[in-house]
Amino acid sequence: MEAQTPDSPETARPIEYPRARVGSRGRLYAAVVLLACAGAIALAVWLTPDPRGYGTHQQFGFGKCGMLITTGLPCPTCGMTTAFAYTVRGRLISAFLAQPAGFLLALATIACAIGAGWVLVTGRIPRIRVPIVTPYRLFFGLLVLLIGSWAFKIVLGLLDGTLPDRG
């Protein structure tokens, strides 16, 4: 029988890193993030999603999208508020069809609220394994998501006859 060495498979164990604890400043940051996310979610609950897939922001007193008025086609962010309003109601397909980027941002907002609540209550940062994202990759990833969602919204509107909107 061979002697076990520290590198042998029988003694190899996965390395466990201690979970990072946060102090009072970290909990304060978590509280601010939780309040911001909860505010956005509460506003989305308060709004009634516009069945057209855009225009929900007008319930805040804002005017119609200038690009939509001028060209008959939506701007890159048309449908974001509607997507949030549909997402908080669990109408995920409607949210995606209203604005795919808005749907993903709504899910990210909910995830951030849950994560911030976790940090606030436990004082520990949750273990989430994500690849390292540089600011460059994040910027271009979000840019591709926004432009892709905009193209999706225009193509969908042209195919179902709701665009161009001349109303």
Image (spheres, helix red, strand yellow):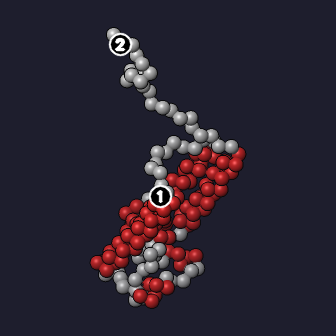
* Residue at 44 percent of width and 65 percent of height: 140
Identity of the residue furthest to the top in this view: 1
Q: Residue at x 54, y 50 (%)?
A: 114
Q: Which mark is residue 107?
A: 1
Residue 31: horizontal and vertical position, in percent? 65, 52
Mark 1 / mark 2, whichever is N-terminal: 2
- 154 relative to 25 in the view: left or right: left
Name the residue type under label 1.
Answer: Leu
**Three-letter code for the amino acid on which mark 2 is drawn:** Glu
**Which residue in the structure is indicated by mark 2?**
2
Along the line of sight, the residue nearer the viewer: 60 or 116: 116
Residue placed most toward the observer, 85 or 13: 13
- Sort mark 2 into few (<14), some (14-19) or many (20+) by Cα contacts within 10 Å: few
Real-space Cα separation, disc 1 to disc 2, in angstroms: 53 Å
Quarter of the image where the C terminus is located: bottom left
Q: Secondary structure at mark 2?
A: loop
Discs 1, 2 touching: Cβ within 8 Å: no
Residue neighbourhood size for the residue with mark 1, other residues' Cα within 10 Å, grouped as few (<14), some (14–19), many (≥20): some
Residue for point 53% across, 75% down? 57
Residue at 57% over, 37% down: 19
Q: Nearer the viewer, mark 1 or mark 2?
A: 2
Quadrant for residue 36, please give it. Answer: bottom right
Measured along the vertical axis of the image, is residue 34 above or below residue 80? above
Counting from the top left corner in percent of width and height, residue 8 is at 39, 22
Determine whether the residue tagged by mark 1 lies in a helix, strand or loop: helix
Query: Which mark identifies residue 11?
Result: none
